[in-house]
Every structure is written in structure tokens, then in C-alpha cells.
Image (cartoon, helix red, strand yellow):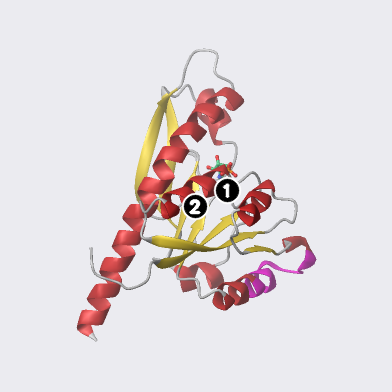
Amino acid sequence: MPEREEPVRLAIFISGRGSNMKTLVEACLDGDVVAKPVLVLSNSYSAAGLEWASEQGLPIAAIDHRAYDDRESFEKDVQQTLELHNVEFIALAGFMRVLTSWFTEQWEGRMINIHPSLLPKYPGLHTHKRAIEAGDAEAGCSVHWVTEGVDEGAVIDQERVAIQEGDTPDTLAERVLEREHILYPRALAKAIEDFLDREAEDEAEA
Ligand code: GAR
């Protein structure tokens, strides 16, 4: 891993509960990831995870997408907030807004997402219901780089979960979420390492 004086400045985006965000913050504080959470941002004021983040003394921002006429004007305010906090890397953790190419292009190679399916299977919503209805033997979760296409970027890492007889979308979601909490810190560490390698290469070339 290349030397760097400061940890990577990380923003975590949430829309609700924020359980994945908690595992990422804890992994950073434990030193498992060479990143420092500098912002937890939500598109909803009522996201429960904001309260926890604020109790930890982390800077939080709530930008309600419903106050904007279109996605891009919402994203321009998000971008401004990220610049204010000198954010270098974004982890989407249950962030339920689709991002436009205006935003994803600026953050390509510096933004990752967790998705509750074994991508490329079941991008989008209702992943557990779709896996059960298809008669799949297993489900799981993936962390991937974010690109313009929703849930289409290269997969960084995955965790698999057996689908059991009698599973409902809720029981399966619960078991997958346990794996998400193991997967996401591990995948973030990998992604940050990759980001730092690229940064060191660029510096060597300059
Ligand atoms: C997680 O299961 C995550 O994989 C999913 O939302 C949940 C958020 O839970 N994300 C998506 O569906 C993204 N398309 P959390 O707020 O407790 O982390």
C-alpha cells in the first residue's frame, strides 16, 4: 500500500436505517480501512442513521431530493456539500436515489455501492422476492463500483447466503444483511486500496 499522510476522506450516503453506514464508520475507526468518515449525507431528513452519526460526532447533511425540480439540481447541491467537506471517496450505503451520469462521471473510480443481490443478477428493487420466486438456491450481496448504469459497475466483492425452504423476502433480507455487514468493510478496504494505488501511479507519472 502506498504511503499517504492523511486517510482518504470518505462520505457515506444513506436513505434510512444506516446499519451498513455504522459498520463502515466502525471499520474506519478501528483502522481496518485507511479512510476517515468526514460526512454522512442523506436525501431524507428522517433517515434514522443520521441521528447515530451525529451522536458519534460525525458531520451530517440532509438534502431532501423532493425540494428539487430535477435530479441534477439536487445533485449539484450534493456536490457542493461534498466539496465543502473535501470529500475524496463515496460509499453508498442504502442510498435509494438513482444518480445521473452528471454525478457518476465525476466520481467514477471513487464511488462504490452495496446491493442486496448476487450481481449481475437482480439489479434494481425487490431483489430477495425475485430470487425466491425464481427458485434460486442462493442469494447474497455485492459491492460494486458505481457507473452510469444502475447496479452495473464492476463487482468488487460478494457474500453468498443459502435460500432456505420457507424463506420470505423478509427472512432472507435479514440473513443477507448480516453478510452485508461483513462484506462492506472488507470491500471498502479493497476499493480504497485500489484508489490509493491509482493515485500513487498518477503521482509517479506526473
Ligand atoms: C441494504 O440491504 C442495502 O443493501 C440496500 O438497502 C439496505 C439498507 O440498509 N440497498 C439497496 O437496495 C440499494 N439499491 P441499511 O440502511 O441498514 O444499511
The image quadrant that residue 57 belongs to is bottom right
Q: Position of residue 165 (x, y in %)?
A: 50, 13
Q: Residues within 10 Å of mark 1 (few under 14, many from 20)?
A: many
Q: Position of residue 30 (x, y in %)?
A: 40, 50
Q: Which mark is residue 25?
A: 2
> Outermost residue toward the bottom?
206
Question: Along the line of sight, which residue is nearer the eye, 127 or 10?
Answer: 10
Q: Amino acid at mark 2?
A: Val
Q: Is 53 rendered above or below residue 23?
A: below
Could you classify mark 2 by the number of other residues whose Cα lies within 10 Å: few (under 14), some (14-19), or many (20 or more)? many
Badge 1 residue CB within 8 Å of ligand 1 = yes
Q: Is residue 26 above or below residue 147?
A: above
Q: Which residue is mark 1?
A: 94
Can the viewer see residue 197?
yes
Which residue does the image show at 54% across and 18% down from the upper left? 167
Q: Determine if the magenta segment contains residue 33.
A: no
**The magenta segment:** 67-77
Q: Secondary structure at mark 1?
A: loop
Question: Which of the labelled discs sits on residue 191, or is there none?
Answer: none
Q: Residue at x 48, y 32 (%)?
A: 178
Q: Is residue 70 magenta?
A: yes
Q: Nearer the viewer, mark 1 or mark 2?
A: 2
Ligand 1's image quarter is: top right
Out of 157 and 181, give the one closest to the viewer: 181
Locate residue 141: give its quadrant: top left
